[in-house]
Every structure is written in C-alpha cells, then in structure tokens.
Image (spheres, rainbow, N blue to C red):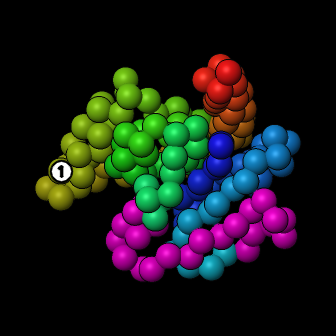
Amino acid sequence: MLHIFVDADACPVKPEVYRVANRYHLDVTLVANSWMRIPNERSVVLEVVGDGLDAADDWIVDHVQLYDIVVTADILLASRCLKKGARVIGSSGKLFTENNIGDAVATRDLLAELRSAGEMTGGPPPLQKRDRSRFLHQLDEVIQSIRRQYSLNST
C-alpha cells in the first residue's frame, strides 16, 4: 500500500519527497538511468535501469499499483500511471488527473510539433520556491486522500 515512485533523473524535488515520505513512514523508489546519491535509509531505494529511451518510464509503469504515488514531469508517463490507478504529481506541484491529462498530452504534442517545425518554445521555467511549497502541499494532500480512501475501502 502507498509507495512513492520518483522519475528521478531530472527530478528537482527529491529532497522534498524524502522529507514527506519520512514523516509518513513511506517507502520511496527512485528510478533513474544512472547512479545517484540517495539518503542512507532503508525506506529509500534507487533502481537503475538501462539507457533505453523509456526504460525508467516502463519500469515505473510495470511496478506502480493502485494507491501508489508517482512524481514526474513526464506527461506521457503520468498518463500511463493514471491508467493503472496511481496518483501523479508534477515537480511543480501540479496534480495530474483523469480530468486534466488529456489537455496536458495535447499541449505536449502541440509543443513537440512546434519544436520539430523549428519554433523555439523553450523549456519549463525554473522551479521557484513557491513551486516547491505547492509540491509539498500537494504531496501531503494526496497522501492524506489515499489514506482516507484506503481505510474506507478496507473496512
């Protein structure tokens, strides 16, 4: 029940994930294409996958379950995880849901098309302090929501 998976290669909010997971005594799995330093805690595990384009995404989708949380900025990964019943939070604190993922995928596809046509669309803005705060709040809210839902469903 309730495990946090982090699409870790470019995730800027790993310290926030560790802090919240520690508070709730949750396990965290970071999935990355290369080794990285992680806290020396039994509850935090690093899964290094191959260098394939979607290797980390595929690993997460293969292991995520209902009542799990995925932290990613990858919209296509978010969509795949939502289909498996997981909750998905972007690093800026945006909660991906069944109601907003279609628009997010469409926007992503449009921007990719513009980039391939030579338009400069830029990347995401740098993470601000308020984004980190929003992320922390959203992660806390999602954990509380899952715990309420799980306790209702298990009785």
Residue 40 can be seen, yes or no: yes
For the question of whether residue 134 can be seen, the reply is no
Residue drawn 73% across and 54% down? 27
Quadrant of the image occupied by residue 62: bottom left
**Residue drawn at the location 64% of the way across and 49% of the way down:** 4
Q: Does residue 75 belong to the magenta stretch?
A: no
Q: Position of residue 148 (x, y in %)?
A: 69, 22
Residue drawn where x is 59% and y is 55% of the image: 6
Q: Is residue 124 left or right of residue 99?
A: right
The region drawn magenta spans 37-58
Query: In x, y percent, where is residue 98?
Result: 38, 28
The answer to whether residue 86 is left or right of residue 19 is: left
Which element type, helix, strand or loop, lies under badge 1? helix
Q: Is residue 94 left or right of residue 19?
A: left
Answer with left or right where residue 50 lies relative to residue 103.
Answer: right
Name the residue that disc number 1 marks: 113
Q: Residue at x 78, y 59 (%)?
A: 43
